[in-house]
Amino acid sequence: MKNAAIIPQKIYDLSALQHAVNTWRFLGKKIVFTNGVFDILHRGHIYSLSQAAQEGDILIVGVNADASVKRLNKGPERPINDEQSRATLLASLLMVDAVIIFTEDTPYEVITSLLPDVLVKGGDYRVEQVVGHREVIANGGSVVINPIVEGFSTTGIVQRMRS
C-alpha cells in the first residue's frame, strides 16, 4: 500500500493550497480549477475532469462539503458518499493534482483566493453564470465550459437505483 500515503497529500486546506499554487506559479505552471459534488464518480465526471486537466498543467478540484451538498437540495439522501470519501476518490485520479473541500454554497472564496488561470465548469452553465468568472477574467484568466456527457449524472444513477 505504498501509494496510500500519497493520496491525502493531495487534499489541501485553503492556506496550504495557496502556498502550493504560489510554488506552481513560480515554476511557470498554468493553474486550472473546477468544482462539483462528485457524489458518485461516473464517466461524465471523468470526461469533464480529463478535459479540464488539458487546459493547463495543474488541476485543482473543489468539492462541496457535506453541509454544502445538503443546502443544494439534491435530495434528502445526498450526499451518498461523505466529503472525505469524495475528496479521496478525486485525489486518487492521476489527472487531479489537488483537492479542496469548501463549506460555502459556492467555491467563490477558494476561486478568489487562488485566482486560477483557467476556470472550468460543466456544459449546463454559461460563462456569466460561473461563480468567480469576473475575478478570474479580470486577473487575465479564462473560463472554459466543458460539454456534458449525456446520460451520466449522479441524480440519474440514484433515480435508476430506486426503480
Image (tube, rainbow, N blue to C red):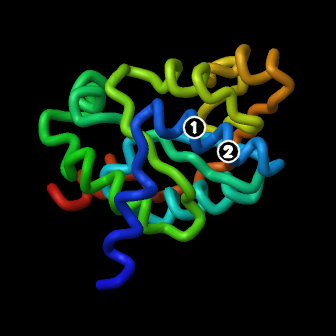
Q: Is residue 72 left or right of residue 76?
A: right
**Percent position of residue 116, x then y:** 69, 34
Q: Are marks 2 and 1 in contact (CB under 8 Å)?
A: yes
The picture quadrant where one finds residue 128 is: top right
Quarter the C terminus occupies: bottom left
Q: Is residue 141 left or right of residue 108?
A: right
Q: CA distance from mark 2 to mark 1?
A: 6 Å
Label 1 residue SS? helix
Identity of the residue drawn at 64% across and 40% down = 21
Quarter the N terminus occupies: bottom left
Label 2 residue SS? helix
**Percent position of residue 8, x then y:** 35, 59
Mark linked to residue 23: 2
- The three-letter amino acid code for the residue at tag 2 is Thr
Q: Is residue 143 left or right of residue 80?
A: right
Q: Is residue 2 left or right of residue 51?
A: left
Question: Would you name the residue on which mark 1 appears?
Answer: 19
Identity of the residue drawn at 59% across and 36% down = 124
- The three-letter amino acid code for the residue at tag 1 is His
- Can you say whether 152 is above or below 23 in the image? below
Identity of the residue drawn at 19% across and 61% down = 161
Q: Tag 1: Cα neighbours inside 10 Å, few (<14), some, or many (≥20)?
A: few
Q: Nearer the viewer, residue 67 or 160?
A: 67
